[in-house]
Image (cartoon, rainbow, N blue to C red):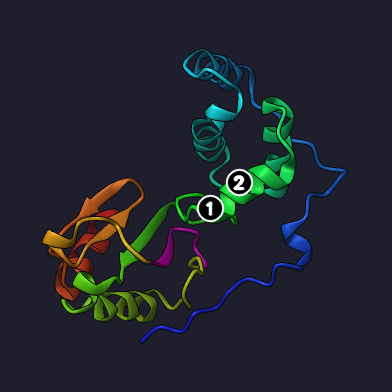
Amino acid sequence: MADLHPDNPYAKDRFADSTKKVEFPEEVKKRFDVILTRYPTKEAALLPTLHLVQETWGWISPEAVHYVGELLDLAPSTVFGVVSFYDMYNQKPVGKYQLRVCTNLSCMVNNAYDIYEGLCHKLDVKPHETTKDGLYTVVEVECLGSCGTAPVVQVNNDYHESMSVEKMNTLLEKLK
């Protein structure tokens, strides 16, 4: 079974660098403005704004947390609370393909850990690490909500259901 490796909440890379500022490119700012029109308050636009940040930069840096707080008139702690609550938001840079293996009960009893550990071994990474070539990040997730088709692996935004080690290896070849 995979070991859990919780991040140190006091690690320096979790705090914004005041010398680094981020800002949406102009075309992304326009998309943000459209998002604001769809919600009754700025705070209600937090989740879609975070998705926009992640789509733009691939992850949500501490500097981006502060930027979103400024955009939505929210404290950075409020924004970070949301980012850290949902595992769909990347708090560190990830590979081109994020391989999220569900290990909740239905998936676990259908050999999800074989898939998960097989990926880590085949790609020579530890859990939550990115391969040296920057292609893959392997992540264990609690539930992907597809218990009837367990085990499930999410590759970026796409679900791959009824997976096995063999199917995962075939999928990896297609992703290269």
Q: Secondary structure at mark 2?
A: loop
Q: Position of residue 59 (x, y in %)?
A: 56, 47
Q: Secondary structure at mark 1?
A: loop
Q: Which image quarter holds the C terminus?
A: bottom left
Q: Is residue 63 visible?
A: no
Query: What residue is drawn where x is 75% and y is 68%?
Result: 11
Q: Is residue 21 left or right of residue 30?
A: right
Mark 2 surroundings: few (<14), some (14-19) or many (≥20) residues within 10 A: many
| Residue 135 belongs to magenta span | yes
Amino acid type at image mark 1: Asn
Q: Is residue 129 visible?
A: yes
All told, the count of numbered labels is 2
Q: Hey, which residue is sitting farthest bottom in the picture?
A: 1
Q: Position of residue 159 (x, y in %)?
A: 23, 51
**What segment carries the magenta color?**
132-141
Q: Is residue 7 left or right of residue 51?
A: right
Amino acid type at image mark 2: Ile
Q: Nearer the viewer, residue 71 or 12?
A: 71
Residue 40's place in the image compared with 1, above or below, is above
Query: What residue is drawn where x is 78% and y is 49%?
Result: 16
Q: Nearer the viewer, residue 7 or 130?
A: 7
Residue 14's place in the image compared with 114, above or below, is above
Image quadrant assignment for residue 116: bottom left
From mark 2 to mark 1, how far is it between C-alphas? 6 Å
Q: Are marks 2 and 1 in contact (CB under 8 Å)?
A: yes
Query: What residue is drawn where x is 55% and y is 78%?
Result: 5
Q: Position of residue 174 (x, y in %)?
A: 23, 56
Q: Provide the residue designation for mark 2.
A: 60
| Residue 7 belongs to magenta span | no
Q: Provide the residue designation for mark 1.
A: 90
